[in-house]
Amino acid sequence: MIDLATSLGRLGAWGHLDTLAAPDLHAYAQRIAELGYGALWVPETVGREPFALLGAISTDVGSMWLGTSIASIWARDPMAARMGAQTLHELTGGRFVLGLGVSHPHLAQKLRGHTYDRPLTRMREYLEAYRRMPYMGPRLPGEASPTEPSILLAALRERMLGLSATAADGAFPYLVTPERIAWMRGILDAATTGTTDTADGIAADGAGDVDVVRPEGRPLLAVTLAVVLGDATAARAAARAYLVPYLRAPNYQASWEAQGFAAADWEQPGSDRLIDAMIAWGTETDIRTRIDELHAAGADHVAIIPLQPDGTTQHLATLEALAPAR
């Protein structure tokens, strides 16, 4: 059985990659692999399609892992998701991680035309359907028996964390403090022993246990961390440009409230208190300290989001400065 935490390593890189012209994608991915990052993660919003994007760079990254962070369950049915995941599993030599999430009401309903309700139930049903779907495409060469890509869930609340531990390989939260990571680590670990309870004050959707279908072992806890090398003024400007769409998302607002923030903190353009808690900025040493705090709190893998001054997410100089290979 793969030790996913060891395979991914302590540091990864995350980015939309939408500001890069097609020919530049390959050089960017190659450089991230050369720098020693364990994984490259891409999201799904309204830019490039993540499965096609990762397929395009799958031959550029050597032994580095590739993953979605996060693919929306509303973007493709379980059959399409399984076909895409298995294809990338093959193309990467078994180094693909499928990150799945329930997205947000405005993206699922207004943009895609779905009915956004009971997100925990929808995710549970999606995972169950995903695993029932047939796949007759090529498998990895030399496999004695077919293997499956690992699955991580975007999780902020207790019940989704529990589902991440019992029906997937772990969780991939976003915009959380080290203190919240420590709480999440406890929820994930307790879920594997059946000792969880609802303790964060957020109403949970769904009820009842789910069948344990994930491999044995400790659930993985990965987390993203947006970073800016620079002083407070420049860093906060970049961070605010990046956080604009997240400040108005109810899911994140509820998560921030559970972390001790208030409505005044996420009112545009975001308070300094919230910005500084969500974005790591300062010197290379300052940012490495923040990364270490997340690991000490229980994160297995930290995916760095290197912010450019305009808030876009492909600042290679930042990845160069923080590279594991250094």
Image (cartoon, grey):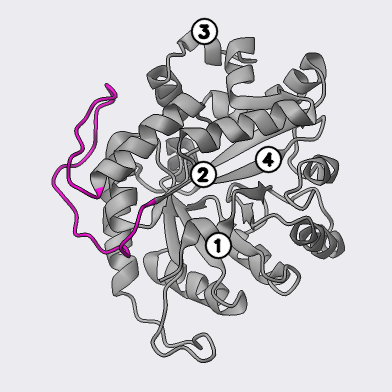
- Residue density around tag 1, few if under 14, some if 14–19, many if 20 or more, within 10 Å: some
Query: What's the magenta bit mostly, secondary-structure-wise?
Result: loop
Q: Quadrant of residue 268?
A: top right
**Was residue 115 drawn as part of the magenta stretch in this picture?**
no
Position of 292 with respect to 264 (left or right) is right
Mark closer to the chain start, 1 or 3: 1
Q: What amino acid type should be assigned to the residue bearing mark 2?
A: Leu
Mark closer to the chain start, 1 or 4: 1
Label 1 or label 2, whichever lies nearer to me, is: 1
Q: Which residues are magenta?
A: 192-219
Identify the residue position indicated by label 3 in the image: 264
Residue 195 x/y as whole percent? 18, 40
Label 3 or label 4, whichever lies nearer to me, is: 4
Picture mark count = 4
Give the number of the disc on residue 221. none
**Was residue 203 drawn as part of the magenta stretch in this picture?**
yes
Residue 319 x/y as whole percent? 78, 45
Identify the residue position indicated by label 4 in the image: 305
* Residue located 45% across and 53% down the image: 100
Residue 215 x/y as whole percent? 32, 65
For label 2, the SS is: helix
- Residue density around tag 4, few if under 14, some if 14–19, many if 20 or more, within 10 Å: many
Label 2 or label 3, whichever lies nearer to me, is: 3
For label 1, the SS is: helix
Mark closer to the chain start, 3 or 4: 3
**Separation of disc 1 and disc 3 at Cα?**
41 Å
Contact (Cβ within 8 Å) of mark 2 with mark 3: no
Identify the residue position indicated by label 2 in the image: 111
